[in-house]
Image (tube, grey):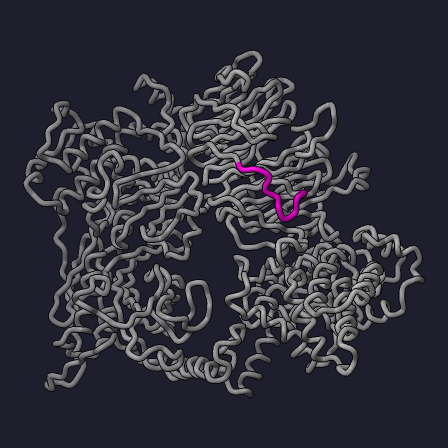
Amino acid sequence: MSRIFEYFVVCGIGPEIRTIDGSKGYHGPGWMYLPSLLDQYPPPNHALYPPPPPQLSTCVLPAGVEFYSSGFDSNDPSSFPRSYPIVLTEGDGSKIYVSCISFRDLVCEDIAEAYRIQANSYADKCICLVSRLPSFSVLRSALEEIFTLCFSSKGSSKPLWDVIAHMVSSVPLPTPGKERVLFAIESCLLSVEAPPNDWLPHADISFLPIVQCLDVDNLVRLFTAVLLERRILLRANKYSLLTLASEAICHLIYPFRWQHVYIPLLFFSGVDYIDAPTPYMMGLHSGVDISALAMDGVVVVDLEYNLITTSEEIPPMPEPEFSILRGEIMKLIYPNVIGIDEMKSGIYRLYDHDSKLRAKLWGEEHDLQLRMIFLKFFATLLSGYRNFLENSATQVFNTQAFLKKRSRSTNQPPEPMIAQFLDSHGFLDYLERGVGSDESNNNLLDKLQDAIGRGQNPMSIFPSSPVETEILTVSDFDIGISGSGAKYTYDKFPENIRTDEQEEKRKQTLAAVSNAFEYSGRHTPSKDPLADTLSPLERAAERDRMVLDIKVKLQGLWLRLLKLGATDDPLSSFEYGTILALIESDAEGIGGSGFVECIREHIHSGWDCHLTEEQFIAVKELLKTAINRATSRNDLLTIRDALEVSSDMYKKDNNNVPDYCQRHLISLPIWEELRFWEGYFDYLMEQSSNKSANYASLVTAQLVVLTSHMAGLGLPDNDAWYMIETIAERNSIGSKQFIKIRGFLSHIQQLRNGYWGISSIKAQSVLSHAMPSPHSKDVKDENQQPTEATGVGRSWVQSMFTRNTTTRSSSFSHVRRWTSDGGNSATNDNGTPRKQDLLSGGQKKLQTNVRTLRGHNGAITALHCVTKREVWDLVGDREDAGFFISGSTDCSVKIWDPSLRGSELRATLKGHTRTVRAISSDRGKVVSGSDDHSVLVWDKQTTQLLEELKGHDGPVSCVRTLSGERVLTASHDGTVKMWDVRTDRCVATVGRCSSAVLCMEYDDNVGVLAAGGRDVVANIWDIRASRQMHKLSGHTQWIRSVRMVGDTVITGSDDWTARIWSVSRGTCDAVLACHAGPILCVEYSSLDRGIITGSTDGLLRFWENDDGGIRCAKNVTIHNAAILSVNAGEHWLGIGAADNSLSLYHRPQERLGGFSGAGSKMAGWQLYRTPQKTVAMVRCVASDLERKRICSGGRNGLLRLWDATINI
C-alpha cells in the first residue's frame, strides 16, 4: 500500500554540535548551529523504507539552529511557532513535499550537561511531515494537530509517537479522482483526495499570494523569465511565501515543466549557489545579505516590494498575446474595473460564470481561472504547432518553419521571446513527453486548441460529469490503558524510543565531549573529542578494521594506477579518482596515511620509483592532497611520513626531482609560514642536548638546521633568508653569527643536492637551472662545499624522517600554538593559515608565488592584461606591458603593476556609476564599459578622464581599442558602435543584432567583425565595406564566446557546443559537441592549428584536424568548476576556472619536430604548474603568458595573482 505520509521527522540540535561554518562544540547563544536529524518514523533501521533525503535537516531549518534563554513568550512574536512548507527536488527531478513547524524547545539535559550549556536553555527544533503528494493543506493540518496534542494542556489519550506511527503507516494514498480518504488524529477529522488524471495537475496551494505580491506587469515579466529559463532568485521575509510563489509559477507554466535547479527555500549558508552559471529558481530569505555577489544576469524578484531587477533584459512578450493575457488577469484580479478597450467577444471572452466570481473572495475557482488564463495563452501562442512536429533523428520540431508561419500571420518579424522559448529545455521536454507516448492522449493544451478552434467553451476540455468518489475511512487504533482515561502531556517534544545501539552511541558521543572539557578545556581545538568514544581495545580493533579495509583498496588501486598504458590519462582514470576520494572522504585521515603507507611498502619491496610524466603529476597531486588534509587536521605524523616517502621516491627518480620541488613541495602553504618555522625553531631549542653552550652559538646552530630544511624543501634563498633573519633578530644574535648563517646560505644548491641525495651530474645541472641562486658565483667547484653543510644536509633527512615514534609525536608540537590562537591568526577561505604581515612596513615581506591584491570593495567583474602588442611602439617595449586592469561592482577601475611587490596598486579610476563590465587599453589609454550605458576613456599615465562616450541604450558588454584612436564597443542594446576618441563621437553603428551582444572579435587587418549573444546568431560584418557579410545560424542557445583567426570563426554557446565557421563561405565547417555544459570560452592554438574549449562542466578539451574532420585529442579534468578563461600563446597556455583554480600548460619546443605528419599535435600540451587553490568564487580571469602570470578576480573583491616564475 502506498502511503500519503512517507516520514515524520524531528530536526534540531543533536549530540554532535557544530556551527554553520563547521566548528565543533558549543560557542555560545549568539552563534548559528547546524541542525541534525534527531528522530524519525519509520525508524532508520526499517528495511522496507529508504532513508529520508540527507539534506532534509539543513533545508527545514534554513537559518540554522539558535539557542535562547527562554521559550515561547506571548509578548514576543519572534518566539511564536512558525508553520511553512518546503519542496525538495531529487536527482531524477521528482519532488518531495514537506510541511514544517519550527519552535523553541528545551535543550536535552544530557546535551546541556555535556557541552556546559546553561540549564533550561532553549533551541530551535522543527517537526516535519514528508510526502510525495503535493497536498500542502492536509500536511499542514495533520502536523499542526500533532503539535497541538504535544503542547496542549488537555494532553493526548495515547503516547504521541504511537499517534504519529499510526498516522504515517495507516493513511493510504488516494486514487486520483476516485477516492477520498478520511482519517482522524484524536478528535480531529481530516480528509485527502487528488484530482483525476485528465484534470490540471494537483496544486493544493492558493495563487492569491503571488498576485498580491506582484502587479500584473511584474507577474507576466516573471512568467516570461521562467519560460526563458533564466536564473531566478525570489526574495521574501516569510518562508511560506517563497515556497508558495515558486510552486505557483511552476503551475502557471503548465503544460511545461521547470527543468533546472529548483530550491524554493535556500538554506542561508548556501548563498554561494546564487553564483551558479546555469539556470535555476531559488528562494532566499530577504534577511540574507547578497550585496557581495555579482548577480550577473540574475532575475531578482522582491516579493515584499513588488520589484524585479536584472542586469540582462527580459525580452517582451509578443503581441497581441501580451495585451490579451494582461487584460484577462486584470479582469480576474480587479473584477469591478472595466477597461474601455475590453473585448466584447472572441475566444478570450470571460466565461459566463465570471460574474459570479466578482462578488466572492479569492478561492479555488479563482485559482482555476488563473491557471486557465495562462493555458489559453499557450494555446494561442503555439497555435498550429502540431503541424511542425517531426520525428526525425535530428529534430522533433521545425522551429524555423513555425516562426516563418507565425511571422506571416502576424505580419511581424520573429519575436526573440518566442524563438528563445522554442529552444528551451522545457519546450523540448514537452515535445519528448508528448511524441509517441500515452501522455499525448491527456494533453490539455491540444484539447484546448481543438476546443477553441471549434468555438467551444474552454472548460469543456474537462470531464462534464465528475465521477463520484469512494470514501475510504481509516479506523482509529486502540492503544493505552483501556478505560483508565490516561492523558499524556509533555513540556517538550518527546524523543522516540531509541534502540540499545543508538542509545549507547549517543552516550559515548556525549561522554567524549564531557571528557574533552574536563581533560583539556578549550585549548586544543584541533583534537576531535569524539576520538575517544570507544574503549581503547574497541577503538584499536575498529581502527585496525578500517585501516585494513581502506589499505586493501588502496593497494589494488595503486598498482593499477602504475600499470596504466601510455595512452591513458592517469588524472582522468577511475583509479586516480577513487584514491583521491578515499583520501578526502574520511575525517580521521585513514585514507591519506594509508596511501602513504601503501607507497612506503611498495618502495621497500624493491620498486624502482620510475614514473612517466603523467603518472608523476597524478602521484604529486595525491600526495599534495594527503599532506594538505593532514595539515588541516594537525596530523603532523602523516605529514612527516608523506615527506619521507616523497624523498625516497624522488631520490630514485632524478628526472622528476626538480619538477617535484617546483610543483609539489613549494606549492604547499605550510612551508611558507613564518610561524611554522618559529615553532619548529622553539622545538629545536628545547630538544638541544648542549644547553650549556653559549646562547648565541646555540641559536646559530639551530638556525643552520632550519636553513638546511628550507633548502631541501626548495624555498628560494631570498625567502629562506627573510625568515631566518626574522627569527635571528628576535633572538638577538650578533653580526658574526649573521655572517656565518648568510655564508651557509651561499651553498644552497649543494644543500638541495644533499637533501635529495642526487648524484647524477645531469640532474644536478637541471636542478641548478631550475632553482638559480643569487650566490651561484660563490659555488665555482662542488668540492668547495663546507663539510658542515653536507653533514647538516644529511642529518636533516635523518632527523626529519626518523622512525622514532617518541620524536614523531612531539616534533611539531610547538607549531600548534599558532594554529590554535583564534584571535591572532588569520586564515584563508578554506581554513588554512595564511601569511601575516608580522613585521613593520619598512621590513621585507615574505615572497610567495601567489599574491592577494586588495583594493576593490565589490565583486570583480572585468579583468584585462596589458599585452606587449597593445603597447608596442617604435621606441620598443613600454613599462606598462604586463599590467593588470580590473573593474568591479564598486564602479571603479584599478591598474595593478605586478612588478611592485607589496604596492601593486598603481592607480584608481573613478567615473562610472554602475558595475564595470569590460576593459581594454592601448599605448596611452584605458577604456572601460559599464552597466551605466557609458564608455569612459582615461589617460593611462595621468589617470585623468579624457572622454565619456554615450550612445548605447543598454549595459556595455565589450570594448576594444583599435588603431587610429578608435574604440569598438558592444552593448545589450544589440548594437556594435565605433567611436573616434579625438572627437568624442560615434563614427558609425557598425552592427545591429536582435538582442544583447555578449562577445565580439575584430580583425583590424581586414576590417572583419564577428559578434554573438542572446539572439543565438553569429553575425559577421565587413566594417570597411559597411555591410553585413553573414548571419550564421546553428546555435540554439546564447553565444558566450567568439574567436576569429583568418578566415575561421569559432563560437561557444550555452547549447553545449562550439562551432567552426568559414567567413568567406558563410558556412559551418564543424560542430564540437562533447561537453556536458555551456561552453564559456574558445581559443585557437596557432602552433598546432587546433582549438581549445572550456565549459561549465569543468573540462578542458583540445581539438585537432584529423583526416578531413576534427576530433578531441585531449581531455583535461583537473578543474572542478566552470572554465572561465583560456589564453593560448606559442608555447604557453593559461587556464582559469570559477573555483579559483589556475593552471599553466607548456608546449615543449623540442617536441615540435615530431608533429609534422601523423600523431596527436594538441596532445603535446602538458601541465606545467598549478598553484595551491583557495576557496573563492571567481568571476573573471586574465593571463600574461609572456611573464607566466595569471590573475583571477573573485566575488569577494580580491584579485589573486599567480606568478609561475617564482620559486623556480
Q: Visible in this render: residue 856? A: yes
Q: Could you say which quadrant of the image residue 389 lies in? A: top left
Q: Could you say which quadrant of the image residue 1066 lies in? A: top right
* Residue at x 22%, y 53% (from the top left corner): 176
* Placement of the N terminus among the 4 image quadrants: bottom left
* Residue at x 54%, y 20% (from the top left corner): 981
Q: In the rendering, at what x and y percent does residue 996 appear?
A: 44, 28
Q: Is residue 426 left or right of residue 551?
A: left
Q: In the rendering, at what x and y percent does residue 643 appear?
A: 71, 67
Between 397 and 563, the one nearer to me in the picture: 563
**Which span of residues is magenta-colored?**
899-908
* Residue at x 25%, y 46% (from the top left corner): 304
Q: Is residue 904 magenta?
A: yes
Q: In the rendering, at what x and y percent does residue 1184 appear?
A: 66, 39
Q: Give the answer, above or below, for where 896 lies relative to 36.
A: above
- Magenta: main secondary structure equals loop
Q: Give the answer, above or below, for where 863 lies relative to 535.
A: above
Q: Is residue 890 left or right of residue 830?
A: left
Between 410 and 416, the one nearer to me in the picture: 416
Q: In the rendering, at what x and y percent does residue 807 appear?
A: 70, 80
Q: Is residue 264 magenta?
A: no
Q: Give the answer, above or below, for where 227 lies relative to 633.
A: above
Between 776 and 187, the one nearer to me in the picture: 776
Q: Visible in this render: residue 435? A: no
Q: Is residue 836 left or right of residue 189?
A: right
Between 769 and 1064, the one nearer to me in the picture: 769
Q: Give the answer, above or below, for where 927 lies relative to 1074.
A: above
